[in-house]
Image (spheres, rainbow, N blue to C red):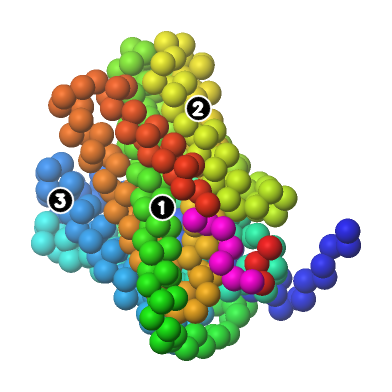
Amino acid sequence: MAVPVVAPELRAARAGVFGIFALNGFMLAMWVVHIPVISERAGVSKATLGLLILVLAGGALIGMQLAGPLADRFGSRTMVTAAAVALCVTVLGPGFAHNAVALGIALIVFGFANGALDVSMNAQAVHVEQQYSRPILAAFHALFSCGGLAGSLVGAATLAMGWDVRLTLAVAAATGLVVTAACVTRMLPHVPHPPTHAAKPSRQRSRTVIALGLIAFALLMSEGTALDWSALQVKEHLDTSDAAAALAFGAFSVMMTLGRFGADRVSAAIGPVRVVRYGTLIAAAGIAVVIFSDWPLLTLAGWALFGLGLSGGIPQIFTAAGNLSGGSPSTNMSRVFGMGYVGLLAGPAVIGWLTKLISLNSALVVPLVAVLLASVFAGVVSPRSPTDH
Protein backbone atom coordinates (compact mmCIF):
# COMPACT_ATOMS: atom_id res chain seq x y z
CA MET A 1 0.00 0.00 0.00
CA ALA A 2 1.34 3.41 -0.98
CA VAL A 3 2.15 5.76 1.87
CA PRO A 4 0.02 8.93 1.63
CA VAL A 5 1.97 12.07 0.80
CA VAL A 6 1.84 14.56 3.68
CA ALA A 7 1.84 18.23 2.75
CA PRO A 8 4.85 20.25 3.99
CA GLU A 9 2.65 22.62 5.99
CA LEU A 10 1.12 19.64 7.79
CA ARG A 11 4.55 18.27 8.64
CA ALA A 12 5.48 21.72 9.92
CA ALA A 13 2.36 21.80 12.10
CA ARG A 14 3.23 18.41 13.54
CA ALA A 15 6.76 19.61 14.33
CA GLY A 16 5.33 22.70 16.02
CA VAL A 17 3.09 20.62 18.26
CA PHE A 18 6.02 18.33 19.07
CA GLY A 19 7.92 21.38 20.26
CA ILE A 20 5.08 22.60 22.49
CA PHE A 21 4.62 19.19 24.11
CA ALA A 22 8.34 19.02 24.86
CA LEU A 23 8.24 22.59 26.18
CA ASN A 24 5.40 21.72 28.56
CA GLY A 25 7.31 18.75 29.97
CA PHE A 26 10.46 20.86 30.29
CA MET A 27 8.75 23.68 32.20
CA LEU A 28 7.05 21.29 34.61
CA ALA A 29 10.42 19.66 35.28
CA MET A 30 11.90 23.08 36.04
CA TRP A 31 9.44 23.38 38.92
CA VAL A 32 9.74 19.77 40.13
CA VAL A 33 13.53 19.62 40.20
CA HIS A 34 13.71 22.85 42.18
CA ILE A 35 11.04 21.97 44.77
CA PRO A 36 13.57 21.45 47.61
CA VAL A 37 15.35 24.76 46.90
CA ILE A 38 12.13 26.72 46.42
CA SER A 39 10.43 25.33 49.53
CA GLU A 40 13.51 26.10 51.65
CA ARG A 41 13.73 29.61 50.20
CA ALA A 42 10.06 30.24 50.98
CA GLY A 43 10.40 28.72 54.46
CA VAL A 44 7.55 26.20 54.08
CA SER A 45 7.30 22.85 55.82
CA LYS A 46 6.66 19.55 54.06
CA ALA A 47 3.04 19.62 55.23
CA THR A 48 2.55 23.13 53.87
CA LEU A 49 4.27 22.17 50.63
CA GLY A 50 1.79 19.32 50.22
CA LEU A 51 -1.10 21.77 50.52
CA LEU A 52 0.54 24.14 48.05
CA ILE A 53 0.94 21.35 45.51
CA LEU A 54 -2.81 20.77 45.82
CA VAL A 55 -3.26 24.49 45.12
CA LEU A 56 -1.22 24.04 41.94
CA ALA A 57 -3.44 21.11 40.98
CA GLY A 58 -6.56 23.18 41.62
CA GLY A 59 -5.24 25.92 39.36
CA ALA A 60 -4.56 23.35 36.66
CA LEU A 61 -8.11 21.98 36.85
CA ILE A 62 -9.56 25.48 36.48
CA GLY A 63 -7.27 26.17 33.54
CA MET A 64 -8.34 22.95 31.84
CA GLN A 65 -12.05 23.69 32.13
CA LEU A 66 -11.72 27.25 30.83
CA ALA A 67 -9.31 26.42 28.02
CA GLY A 68 -11.64 23.96 26.28
CA PRO A 69 -14.51 26.37 25.49
CA LEU A 70 -12.03 29.16 24.69
CA ALA A 71 -10.17 26.91 22.24
CA ASP A 72 -13.47 26.05 20.54
CA ARG A 73 -14.30 29.74 20.22
CA PHE A 74 -10.93 31.27 19.34
CA GLY A 75 -8.99 28.26 18.08
CA SER A 76 -6.50 25.91 19.67
CA ARG A 77 -3.54 27.71 18.07
CA THR A 78 -4.53 30.96 19.75
CA MET A 79 -4.99 29.22 23.09
CA VAL A 80 -1.69 27.34 22.76
CA THR A 81 0.06 30.65 22.16
CA ALA A 82 -1.52 32.35 25.16
CA ALA A 83 -1.09 29.38 27.50
CA ALA A 84 2.51 28.63 26.48
CA VAL A 85 3.53 32.26 26.97
CA ALA A 86 1.77 32.27 30.34
CA LEU A 87 3.52 29.05 31.37
CA CYS A 88 6.95 30.44 30.45
CA VAL A 89 6.29 33.63 32.42
CA THR A 90 4.66 32.04 35.47
CA VAL A 91 7.43 29.46 35.94
CA LEU A 92 9.40 32.40 37.33
CA GLY A 93 6.98 32.95 40.21
CA PRO A 94 7.94 30.08 42.52
CA GLY A 95 11.60 31.02 42.30
CA PHE A 96 10.93 34.54 43.58
CA ALA A 97 8.51 33.53 46.37
CA HIS A 98 9.79 34.30 49.87
CA ASN A 99 6.85 33.00 51.93
CA ALA A 100 4.02 30.48 51.79
CA VAL A 101 1.40 32.96 50.58
CA ALA A 102 3.55 34.20 47.70
CA LEU A 103 4.42 30.63 46.75
CA GLY A 104 0.75 29.63 46.82
CA ILE A 105 -0.18 32.50 44.49
CA ALA A 106 2.72 31.65 42.19
CA LEU A 107 1.71 27.99 42.03
CA ILE A 108 -1.96 28.59 41.33
CA VAL A 109 -1.18 30.80 38.32
CA PHE A 110 1.52 28.38 37.14
CA GLY A 111 -0.93 25.49 37.50
CA PHE A 112 -3.61 27.45 35.66
CA ALA A 113 -1.27 28.07 32.72
CA ASN A 114 -0.20 24.43 32.67
CA GLY A 115 -3.78 23.16 32.69
CA ALA A 116 -4.76 25.54 29.89
CA LEU A 117 -1.79 24.43 27.81
CA ASP A 118 -2.54 20.74 28.44
CA VAL A 119 -5.98 21.04 26.88
CA SER A 120 -5.17 23.46 24.07
CA MET A 121 -2.05 21.64 22.85
CA ASN A 122 -3.91 18.31 22.80
CA ALA A 123 -6.77 19.97 20.90
CA GLN A 124 -4.27 21.22 18.31
CA ALA A 125 -2.66 17.76 18.25
CA VAL A 126 -6.01 16.11 17.47
CA HIS A 127 -6.62 18.75 14.77
CA VAL A 128 -3.29 17.85 13.14
CA GLU A 129 -4.00 14.13 13.55
CA GLN A 130 -7.32 14.52 11.73
CA GLN A 131 -5.48 16.01 8.74
CA TYR A 132 -2.90 13.20 8.79
CA SER A 133 -5.73 10.61 8.70
CA ARG A 134 -3.66 8.23 10.81
CA PRO A 135 -2.79 7.99 14.51
CA ILE A 136 0.01 10.36 15.60
CA LEU A 137 -1.13 11.54 19.04
CA ALA A 138 0.87 9.12 21.21
CA ALA A 139 4.19 10.43 19.87
CA PHE A 140 3.27 13.91 21.11
CA HIS A 141 2.88 12.51 24.61
CA ALA A 142 6.25 10.79 24.26
CA LEU A 143 7.80 14.19 23.48
CA PHE A 144 6.24 15.54 26.69
CA SER A 145 8.12 12.83 28.60
CA CYS A 146 11.33 13.65 26.74
CA GLY A 147 10.91 17.32 27.61
CA GLY A 148 10.49 16.38 31.25
CA LEU A 149 13.66 14.31 31.14
CA ALA A 150 15.57 17.17 29.50
CA GLY A 151 14.29 19.61 32.11
CA SER A 152 15.35 17.31 34.92
CA LEU A 153 18.87 16.98 33.50
CA VAL A 154 19.20 20.73 32.90
CA GLY A 155 17.93 21.50 36.39
CA ALA A 156 20.28 18.98 37.96
CA ALA A 157 23.21 20.43 36.00
CA THR A 158 22.50 24.04 36.99
CA LEU A 159 22.07 23.04 40.62
CA ALA A 160 25.41 21.22 40.50
CA MET A 161 27.03 24.35 39.06
CA GLY A 162 25.57 26.44 41.87
CA TRP A 163 23.23 28.59 39.78
CA ASP A 164 20.66 30.63 41.66
CA VAL A 165 17.21 29.16 41.05
CA ARG A 166 15.99 32.55 39.82
CA LEU A 167 18.66 32.63 37.13
CA THR A 168 17.87 29.09 36.01
CA LEU A 169 14.15 29.82 35.77
CA ALA A 170 14.77 33.11 33.95
CA VAL A 171 16.92 31.37 31.32
CA ALA A 172 14.32 28.61 31.01
CA ALA A 173 11.52 31.17 30.61
CA ALA A 174 13.39 33.13 27.92
CA THR A 175 14.23 29.94 26.05
CA GLY A 176 10.63 28.82 26.32
CA LEU A 177 9.34 32.06 24.81
CA VAL A 178 11.67 31.62 21.83
CA VAL A 179 10.53 28.00 21.39
CA THR A 180 6.89 29.08 21.63
CA ALA A 181 7.33 31.72 18.94
CA ALA A 182 9.00 29.20 16.64
CA CYS A 183 6.35 26.52 17.18
CA VAL A 184 3.00 28.33 17.14
CA THR A 185 3.59 29.91 13.74
CA ARG A 186 3.68 26.41 12.27
CA MET A 187 0.37 25.27 13.75
CA LEU A 188 -2.93 24.86 11.93
CA PRO A 189 -5.41 27.75 12.03
CA HIS A 190 -8.77 27.77 13.77
CA VAL A 191 -11.64 25.65 12.47
CA PRO A 192 -15.05 26.81 13.78
CA HIS A 193 -17.13 24.28 15.71
CA PRO A 194 -20.73 25.45 15.67
CA PRO A 195 -22.80 24.13 18.58
CA THR A 196 -25.31 21.40 17.96
CA HIS A 197 -28.88 21.74 19.15
CA ALA A 198 -30.00 18.15 18.76
CA ALA A 199 -31.04 16.99 22.24
CA LYS A 200 -30.67 13.23 21.81
CA PRO A 201 -27.16 13.28 20.27
CA SER A 202 -26.16 15.76 22.95
CA ARG A 203 -27.24 13.35 25.70
CA GLN A 204 -25.42 10.49 23.97
CA ARG A 205 -22.33 12.62 23.58
CA SER A 206 -22.41 13.55 27.28
CA ARG A 207 -22.58 9.88 28.25
CA THR A 208 -19.63 9.11 25.98
CA VAL A 209 -17.61 11.99 27.44
CA ILE A 210 -18.30 10.69 30.96
CA ALA A 211 -17.32 7.14 29.94
CA LEU A 212 -14.08 8.39 28.37
CA GLY A 213 -13.41 10.45 31.47
CA LEU A 214 -13.87 7.44 33.74
CA ILE A 215 -11.38 5.38 31.73
CA ALA A 216 -8.97 8.32 31.79
CA PHE A 217 -9.50 8.47 35.56
CA ALA A 218 -8.64 4.77 35.91
CA LEU A 219 -5.53 4.93 33.74
CA LEU A 220 -4.13 8.14 35.20
CA MET A 221 -4.90 6.96 38.72
CA SER A 222 -2.76 3.91 37.94
CA GLU A 223 -0.03 6.11 36.47
CA GLY A 224 -0.09 8.35 39.53
CA THR A 225 0.30 5.28 41.74
CA ALA A 226 3.45 4.29 39.85
CA LEU A 227 4.85 7.82 39.95
CA ASP A 228 4.53 8.20 43.72
CA TRP A 229 4.70 4.67 45.12
CA SER A 230 6.78 2.41 42.84
CA ALA A 231 10.13 3.12 44.50
CA LEU A 232 8.75 2.78 48.03
CA GLN A 233 6.96 -0.46 47.15
CA VAL A 234 10.23 -2.05 45.99
CA LYS A 235 12.11 -0.76 49.03
CA GLU A 236 9.52 -2.00 51.56
CA HIS A 237 8.43 -5.24 49.91
CA LEU A 238 11.89 -6.44 48.90
CA ASP A 239 13.98 -4.63 51.53
CA THR A 240 16.31 -3.08 48.94
CA SER A 241 18.49 0.01 49.02
CA ASP A 242 17.15 3.41 48.00
CA ALA A 243 19.21 3.30 44.81
CA ALA A 244 17.83 -0.08 43.79
CA ALA A 245 14.28 1.00 44.63
CA ALA A 246 14.62 4.08 42.40
CA LEU A 247 15.09 1.76 39.43
CA ALA A 248 11.40 0.82 39.68
CA PHE A 249 10.25 4.28 38.64
CA GLY A 250 13.00 4.38 36.01
CA ALA A 251 11.80 1.10 34.50
CA PHE A 252 8.21 2.31 34.49
CA SER A 253 8.90 5.74 32.95
CA VAL A 254 11.35 4.50 30.29
CA MET A 255 8.96 1.85 29.03
CA MET A 256 6.04 4.28 29.07
CA THR A 257 8.01 6.72 26.92
CA LEU A 258 9.20 4.03 24.50
CA GLY A 259 5.69 2.60 24.32
CA ARG A 260 4.27 5.99 23.32
CA PHE A 261 6.74 6.28 20.47
CA GLY A 262 5.40 3.01 19.07
CA ALA A 263 1.73 3.31 20.05
CA ASP A 264 0.68 5.25 16.94
CA ARG A 265 1.85 2.50 14.59
CA VAL A 266 0.18 -0.11 16.74
CA SER A 267 -3.06 1.88 16.78
CA ALA A 268 -2.97 2.24 12.98
CA ALA A 269 -2.52 -1.52 12.65
CA ILE A 270 -5.04 -2.87 15.17
CA GLY A 271 -7.27 0.12 16.08
CA PRO A 272 -7.65 2.22 19.24
CA VAL A 273 -9.98 -0.18 21.04
CA ARG A 274 -7.45 -3.01 20.94
CA VAL A 275 -4.67 -0.64 22.01
CA VAL A 276 -6.62 0.22 25.16
CA ARG A 277 -7.93 -3.30 25.78
CA TYR A 278 -4.71 -5.22 25.27
CA GLY A 279 -2.59 -2.45 26.74
CA THR A 280 -4.53 -2.46 29.99
CA LEU A 281 -4.32 -6.26 30.12
CA ILE A 282 -0.54 -5.96 29.76
CA ALA A 283 -0.58 -3.35 32.53
CA ALA A 284 -2.66 -5.69 34.70
CA ALA A 285 -0.15 -8.49 34.14
CA GLY A 286 2.68 -6.13 35.04
CA ILE A 287 1.18 -4.90 38.31
CA ALA A 288 0.20 -8.48 39.23
CA VAL A 289 3.86 -9.47 38.82
CA VAL A 290 4.83 -6.56 41.06
CA ILE A 291 2.37 -7.63 43.76
CA PHE A 292 3.35 -11.31 43.84
CA SER A 293 7.06 -11.19 42.98
CA ASP A 294 9.73 -11.63 45.65
CA TRP A 295 12.62 -11.19 43.18
CA PRO A 296 13.99 -7.70 42.49
CA LEU A 297 14.63 -8.20 38.77
CA LEU A 298 11.19 -9.72 38.21
CA THR A 299 9.59 -6.86 40.15
CA LEU A 300 11.41 -4.29 38.00
CA ALA A 301 10.20 -6.17 34.92
CA GLY A 302 6.67 -5.93 36.32
CA TRP A 303 6.91 -2.16 36.71
CA ALA A 304 8.33 -1.91 33.19
CA LEU A 305 5.43 -3.97 31.85
CA PHE A 306 3.00 -1.76 33.75
CA GLY A 307 4.46 1.33 32.07
CA LEU A 308 4.37 -0.27 28.63
CA GLY A 309 0.74 -1.32 29.06
CA LEU A 310 -0.38 2.14 30.15
CA SER A 311 1.60 4.00 27.48
CA GLY A 312 -0.89 3.94 24.62
CA GLY A 313 -4.22 4.30 26.42
CA ILE A 314 -4.46 7.99 27.26
CA PRO A 315 -3.67 9.19 23.70
CA GLN A 316 -6.48 6.98 22.36
CA ILE A 317 -8.91 8.43 24.89
CA PHE A 318 -8.02 12.03 24.04
CA THR A 319 -8.29 11.31 20.32
CA ALA A 320 -11.74 9.79 20.85
CA ALA A 321 -12.87 12.81 22.88
CA GLY A 322 -11.60 15.26 20.27
CA ASN A 323 -13.30 13.38 17.44
CA LEU A 324 -16.80 13.07 18.90
CA SER A 325 -19.26 14.09 16.20
CA GLY A 326 -20.98 17.41 16.82
CA GLY A 327 -20.55 19.57 19.86
CA SER A 328 -17.33 21.27 20.88
CA PRO A 329 -14.25 19.02 20.64
CA SER A 330 -11.95 21.08 22.86
CA THR A 331 -14.66 21.37 25.51
CA ASN A 332 -15.17 17.60 25.39
CA MET A 333 -11.44 17.11 25.79
CA SER A 334 -11.28 19.52 28.73
CA ARG A 335 -13.93 17.50 30.58
CA VAL A 336 -12.15 14.21 29.92
CA PHE A 337 -8.86 15.85 30.90
CA GLY A 338 -10.35 17.08 34.15
CA MET A 339 -11.62 13.65 35.17
CA GLY A 340 -8.31 12.05 34.25
CA TYR A 341 -6.33 14.65 36.16
CA VAL A 342 -8.43 14.03 39.26
CA GLY A 343 -7.49 10.37 38.91
CA LEU A 344 -3.80 11.27 38.67
CA LEU A 345 -4.12 13.13 41.98
CA ALA A 346 -6.46 10.63 43.63
CA GLY A 347 -4.40 7.51 42.94
CA PRO A 348 -1.48 8.31 45.26
CA ALA A 349 -3.87 9.65 47.92
CA VAL A 350 -6.04 6.51 47.90
CA ILE A 351 -2.99 4.26 48.12
CA GLY A 352 -1.62 6.36 50.98
CA TRP A 353 -4.90 6.09 52.87
CA LEU A 354 -5.06 2.33 52.35
CA THR A 355 -1.55 1.84 53.73
CA LYS A 356 -2.97 2.75 57.14
CA LEU A 357 -5.08 -0.41 56.92
CA ILE A 358 -3.07 -2.82 54.76
CA SER A 359 0.44 -3.09 53.34
CA LEU A 360 1.53 -0.92 50.41
CA ASN A 361 2.00 -4.05 48.33
CA SER A 362 -1.59 -5.17 49.00
CA ALA A 363 -2.91 -1.69 48.21
CA LEU A 364 -1.65 -2.09 44.64
CA VAL A 365 -4.72 -4.22 44.03
CA VAL A 366 -6.48 -0.86 43.42
CA PRO A 367 -4.62 -0.04 40.16
CA LEU A 368 -4.90 -3.71 39.18
CA VAL A 369 -8.69 -3.53 39.41
CA ALA A 370 -8.70 -0.12 37.70
CA VAL A 371 -6.84 -1.29 34.59
CA LEU A 372 -8.94 -4.46 34.36
CA LEU A 373 -12.14 -2.36 34.40
CA ALA A 374 -10.64 -0.08 31.74
CA SER A 375 -10.01 -3.16 29.60
CA VAL A 376 -13.63 -4.27 29.93
CA PHE A 377 -14.95 -0.86 28.80
CA ALA A 378 -12.29 -0.16 26.16
CA GLY A 379 -14.94 -0.14 23.41
CA VAL A 380 -15.86 3.44 24.33
CA VAL A 381 -12.79 4.70 22.41
CA SER A 382 -14.17 3.30 19.16
CA PRO A 383 -14.27 6.06 16.48
CA ARG A 384 -17.63 7.86 16.43
CA SER A 385 -17.23 9.76 13.20
CA PRO A 386 -18.06 8.11 9.87
CA THR A 387 -14.75 9.34 8.52
CA ASP A 388 -12.77 7.38 11.13
CA HIS A 389 -11.42 3.99 10.30
Q: Earlier in the sequence, mark 2 or mark 1?
A: 1
Q: CA distance from mark 2 to mark 1?
A: 19 Å
Residue 59 in percent (x, y) is at: 25, 65
Q: CA distance from mark 3 to mark 2?
A: 34 Å
Judge whether residue 385 is colored magenta.
yes
Residue at which label 3 appears? 51
Res 286 label: none
Q: Element type at marker 2?
A: helix
Residue at (38, 69) in percent of width and height: 206
Residue 339 in percent (x, y) is at: 33, 58
Whether residue 274 is visible here, answered yes or no, is yes
Judge whether residue 270 is colored magenta.
no
Under mark 1, the amino acid is: Ala
Q: Earlier in the sequence, mark 3 or mark 2?
A: 3
Under mark 2, the amino acid is: Ala
Q: Which residues are the magenta region?
A: 380-386
Residue at which label 2 appears? 285
Q: Element type at marker 1?
A: helix
**In the picture, which quadrant includes the N terminus?**
bottom right
- Quarter of the image for residue 171 reads bottom left
Res 216 label: 1
Task: Return the residue found at the far front.
Answer: 200
